[in-house]
Image (spheres, rainbow, N blue to C red):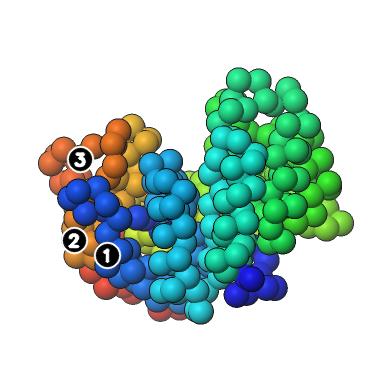
Amino acid sequence: MARFGDFVPSGVIPACLLPFDEDLAIDARDYRKHLGDVAAVPGLTAITTNAHASEVHACSLEEQRQVLDLTLAEIGDRLPVVAGIYADGSLAAAALARMAAAAGASALLVFPPNSMSMGGQLRPEMALAHFKRIADAADLPLILFQYPMASGLGYPVETLLRIVDEVPSVRAIKDWSNDAMLHERHIRALQGLKRPVNVLSTHSSWLMSSLVLGCNGLLSGAGSVIADLQAALWRAVQAKDLARAQALNDRIYPLVQAFYAPPFLDMHNRMKEALVLLGRLRRAVVRPPLVKLPAAEIARLEAALKAARITAAGAFDLAA
């Protein structure tokens, strides 16, 4: 049973990293510490696990269960936990959803099945069937993960509207459309419904620009490092304090430029290295096919942390 039964996905929701030891096994000690560090940031509304940031693609079903259990044990009494549902088949996704609901998750982040990448956008009934199976398996709020349309895994607006109409447990989308015009259309179309569906930005590399369009929150892997800056930016945008939002964005800018530089797939690899530089993780091990970053790139991350004025204790000068 969900520990926060009235949870509606909104506000600031970091997605946590997953540390590994040198043998590529889950480092439970460092993971619990990382969870505690992030959850201690004031103003968060939830924490996400078993998602891109935690390298869910490289984790077995049993490991995903272990990660969720560790998360709930460490912070589940303080914050709602959003569990990722990452599977290429709808039956496997439904099984993950049942597991997460039984463990005590408060919401599910539903990834698009990679099996739909070769034309699934032309068959909206496939996406609808996927979400209906998950909704039938778990009585929890669902967050639809909206990918870029060019990936073949994004849902056309018409399909989105049909899903949220026919699957009322879809309460939010994590918008990674990577298209400012489409992003604004999502916000206006979904949040303007009779039963509003929140748009949570994951456009972390242009977060301020995204939030000022009217998103009802953000769900971001960069929050594993800069949750305090993101929460402060969210508060400034909500207060319509443009000067403060711009000042915070100036601090965020060098880090996201470093995190999201090509190749994009190294973004969470870089975040791990940043936490090692800050003394918040002991090592920055990633699972293959990801590999260790070169020394020159780690040096660029160190420079970006200094430019953003981030220390081991977090950002500073955030009062207001």
Q: How many marks?
A: 3
**In this rendering, the label closer to the viewer, 1 or 3:** 1
Residue 220 picture location, percent across and down: 48, 54
Residue at figure coordinates x 50%, y 74% from the top left: 76
- Whichever of labels 1 and 2 marks the residue nearer the N terminus, that label is 1
Whether label 1 touches label 2, CB < 8 Å: yes
Q: Please report whichever mark, 1 or 3, sits nearer to the chain's N-terminal start.
A: 1
The residue located at (45%, 66%) in the rendering is 69
Q: Residues within 10 Å of mark 3 (few under 14, many from 20)?
A: some
Q: Name which residue type carries label 1.
A: Asp
Query: In screen coordinates, is 168 left or right of 21?
Result: right
User: Crowding at label 2, few (<14), some or many (≥20) Cα neighbours within 10 Å?
Assistant: some
Q: Is residue 319 above or below residue 28?
A: below
Closer to the camera in the image, 304 or 28 = 28
| Labelled disc at residue 282 | 2
Residue 304: x and y, percent?
25, 51
Residue placed under numbered mark 3 in the picture:
292
Q: Residue furthest left?
A: 295
Instruction: State how far apart marks 1 and 2 are (Cα).
Output: 7 Å
Can you see residue 273?
A: no
Please report contact status of discs 1 and 3: CB closer than 8 Å, yes or no. no
In the figure, 201 relative to 313: above or below?
above
* Proximity of marks 2 and 3: CB atoms separated by less than 8 Å: no
At 50% from the left and 79% from the top, the residue drawn is 78
Disc 2 secondary structure class: loop
Closer to us: 257 or 136:
136
- The residue pinned by badge 1 equals 30
Image quadrant holding the N terminus, namely: bottom right
Instruction: Identify residue type, mark 2.
Output: Arg
Nearer to us in this view, 193 or 160: 160
Of the residues under marks 2 and 3, which one precedes in the sequence?
2
- Find residue 269 and report its horizontal and vertical position in percent: 29, 45
